[in-house]
Image (cartoon, rainbow, N blue to C red):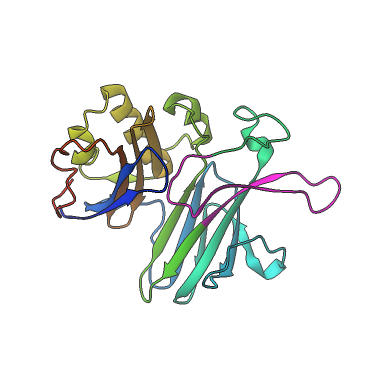
């Protein structure tokens, strides 16, 4: 198993955080086979509308009501030529009525790789519902299938409270069925490890945070498990394998 790991020091405000991301390569099976110019978009919860827009440099993505932009609902498999795109994933805000209060001005989601973590679309016409939206940047590569799992994990919600957003059946498989070593070294509680594995198998993506000093986002991809770990910067030496030295999970 191999891992390419990168480090970013998140600055601009106190406190400071280390951000590590990489892919642990291991045999993985997704619910679909994605080949060549295909893109597979899934979401937790499922049933989100998917819009595809060309990415224009230095321009913030915004919703387009043009019919050609709407490609269907998740889970969705489509063909895209190589290029740079915004993938917009939208759900009715009422889906999250157990987590946020109407009119949903307090909606926030955990960071999972989306370029916009939470946006609210106002109704375009009387009777339409408010919607929550996430934008994902896609650099579509030639002759390579790619995937996006859009995770709508309400900010601050513990794992046991988001289980209902996931499908009941397990659509993802990995060998071995263990968390990346970086999480074992971080000494996640046993119940958290079991829940993360369960949600990964069911939805392909999971998020967990410990207070404000540690968080992890894991996503199943064709080549293995993509992960991002964010740790509070304390100036103390970081244990292996958190050091950004090219070592593995």
Instruction: Give the residue displayed 40% in from the left and 63% down from the top.
Output: 146
Residue lying at the far right in this picture: please name it: 126
Q: Measured along the vertical axis of the image, is residue 59 above or below residue 18?
A: below
Instruction: Give the residue displayed 71% in from the left and 68% down from the top.
Output: 66
Please say whether residue 118 is one of the residues in the magenta stretch: yes
Quadrant of residue 101 in the image? top right
Residue 103, x across and y down, in percent:
73, 35
The range drawn in magenta is 109-135
Instruction: Give the residue displayed 17% in from the left and 46% down from the top.
Output: 243
Residue 86 falls left or right of residue 194: right
Residue 145, x across and y down, in percent:
38, 66
Residue 184 falls left or right of residue 155: left
Please say whether residue 65 is one of the residues in the magenta stretch: no
Residue 153, x across and y down, in percent:
50, 37
- Regarding residue 170, the answer to whether it shows in the image is no
Residue 79 falls left or right of residue 91: left
Instruction: Give the residue displayed 45% in from the left and 65% down from the top.
Output: 138
- Regarding residue 41, the answer to whether it shows in the image is yes
Quadrant of residue 176 in the image? top left
Which sits in the foreground, 238 or 201?
238
- Looking at the rendering, in which quadrant would you find the C terminus? top left
Q: Measured along the vertical axis of the image, is residue 123 above or below residue 181?
A: below
Which sits in the foreground, 7 or 226?
7
Which sits in the foreground, 194 or 248?
248
The mark total stands at 0
């Amino acid at each position: 198993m191999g891992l390419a790991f990168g480090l970013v020091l998140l600055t601009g405000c106190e406190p400071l955080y280390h951000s590590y991301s990489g892919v642990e390569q291991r045999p993985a099976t997704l619910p679909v086979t994605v080949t060549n110019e295909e893109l597979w978009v899934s979401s937790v919860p499922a049933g989100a509308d998917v819009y595809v827009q060309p990415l224009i440099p230095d321009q913030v993505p915004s919703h387009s009501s043009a019919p050609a932009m709407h490609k269907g609902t998740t889970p969705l498999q489509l063909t895209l030529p190589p290029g740079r795109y915004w993938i917009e994933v939208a759900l009715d805000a009422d889906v999250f009525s157990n987590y946020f209060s109407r009119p949903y001005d307090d909606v926030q989601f955990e960071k999972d790789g989306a370029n916009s973590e939470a946006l609210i679309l106002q109704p375009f016409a009387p009777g339409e519902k408010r919607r929550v939206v996430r934008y994902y940047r896609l650099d579509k590569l030639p002759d390579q299938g790619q995937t996006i799992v859009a995770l709508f994990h309400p900010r601050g919600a513990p794992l046991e409270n988001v289980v209902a957003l996931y499908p009941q059946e397990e659509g993802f498989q990995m060998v071995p069925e263990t968390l990346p070593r970086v999480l074992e070294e971080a000494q996640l509680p046993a119940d958290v490890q079991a829940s993360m594995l369960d949600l990964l198998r069911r939805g392909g993506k999971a998020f967990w945070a410990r207070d404000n000093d540690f968080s992890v986002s894991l996503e199943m991809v064709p080549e293995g498990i993509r992960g991002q770990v964010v740790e509070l910067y304390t100036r103390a030496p970081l244990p292996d394998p958190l050091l950004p030295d090219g070592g593995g999970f």
